[in-house]
Image (cartoon, helix red, strand yellow):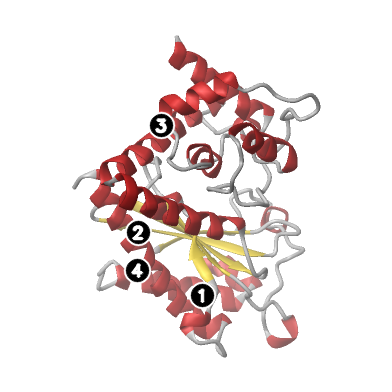
Amino acid sequence: MDLFEQIQSQKQLSQKVLLAVRSAVRDLYYPDTSAENIQCGDMSSFARGTNTDAFPDMDLIFFNAPHDESRGYKDWTAIGTRELVGKKEGITSIEELRLYDARLTEAVLKVGAALAKCFERSRGTAQFNFVRTWPGYPGVVFNLSLPHPQYGELAFDIDIDYSNSHYGVEHARRFEEYFQRVVSELGAVRAVQLVEDIKRLKVQAKDLARDANGWIDRARKLPGFVIEGLFVQRFPPNTYAELMAQVLAHRWNPGREPIDRWVGDQRNQIIDAGFSFSALLENMACDNASLTKGAWGILLEIAQAQRA
């Protein structure tokens, strides 16, 4: 299977999984909503074909989930699982989860069974790995995994979210539209080259951001959506060489440089949004918190190495 076929296959699998999980959670969280009216999406790079991890995952989010405790729904907003159970891994057993949230426990089991059926495993269920949330986070996330004959061990982050939107869903939609435009106007070969360029930079950035223990240093992390945005802030997309040249040529305006801080959320969309390259960098670094000083240093180091 060539890369273009693989990208299409991953998109199809993402949609199949999303529909299966939507069906599994509907009765528990959206009993009065028709399936097609449940707001949800897959935010993962796997669904866009730009993933580089040896063990890829899907990031599925379900919006407007009820959290009214008078109606029997747990409200996790003020709870952090690390503080609750004393483990950074979160809640890692079904029995432990059942003590805190019976409905979420049922959702984990139903989704696990739905995924097994989706992957044509006649018996068993997906492996439950953890439930995590953070104080102030509007929802709760559970993680399952299951082997796939083509993609190996796939993980699934299922976000039961109380809000009505998330940056990543719209980013994924815009990327898909942009990718299809590249296919239709420039051809499948150029579309594949775009994805290969994105993957190349992702791998380079991850390698440079790892600490001595092999973990990604978040202060130096170059997020995947940032990398994608750098290539597709205009049409036609930047080639790898064009992007590196623009990085080397960029000069920060005084007071508009990136700073050291944890990576935060990008609040406005960046794909094909009409930014110049320099304005895009300033938007991500200064108006949001998605491009840190450390991440910019990594990007510059990669560009300098290519020039050498």
Q: Nearer the viewer, mark 3 or mark 4?
A: 3
* Residue that label 4 marks: 16
Q: Which mark is residue 107?
A: 1
Return the x and y of residue 1 as percentages of the image width and height. 18, 47
Q: Is residue 185 above or below residue 284?
A: below
Q: Find the distance from the CA under tag 3 to the CA under tag 4.
A: 32 Å
Residue at the image point whose x is 26% and y is 41% from the top: 189
Badge 2 marks a residue whose secondary structure is: helix
| Relative height, residue 13 to residue 270 (above, below) | below
Percent of width and height locating residue 244: 49, 24
| Residue 223 against residue 160 in the figure, above or below | above
Q: Amino acid at mark 3?
A: Thr
Q: Earlier in the sequence, mark 4 or mark 2?
A: 2
Q: Look at the numbered discs 2 and 1 and tell me whether their residues touch, using CB distance below 8 Å.
A: no
Q: Give the distance between the C-alpha atoms of the residues marked 2 and 1, in whole angstroms.
A: 24 Å
Instruction: Give whichever of discs 3 and 4 has the lower sequence position.
Output: 4
Could you tell me which secondary element the residue under label 1 belongs to? helix
**Residue beneath disc 2:** 11
Amino acid, disc 1 = Ala
Residue at the image point whose x is 68% and y is 27% from the top:
293
- Which residue in the protein does label 3 denote? 239
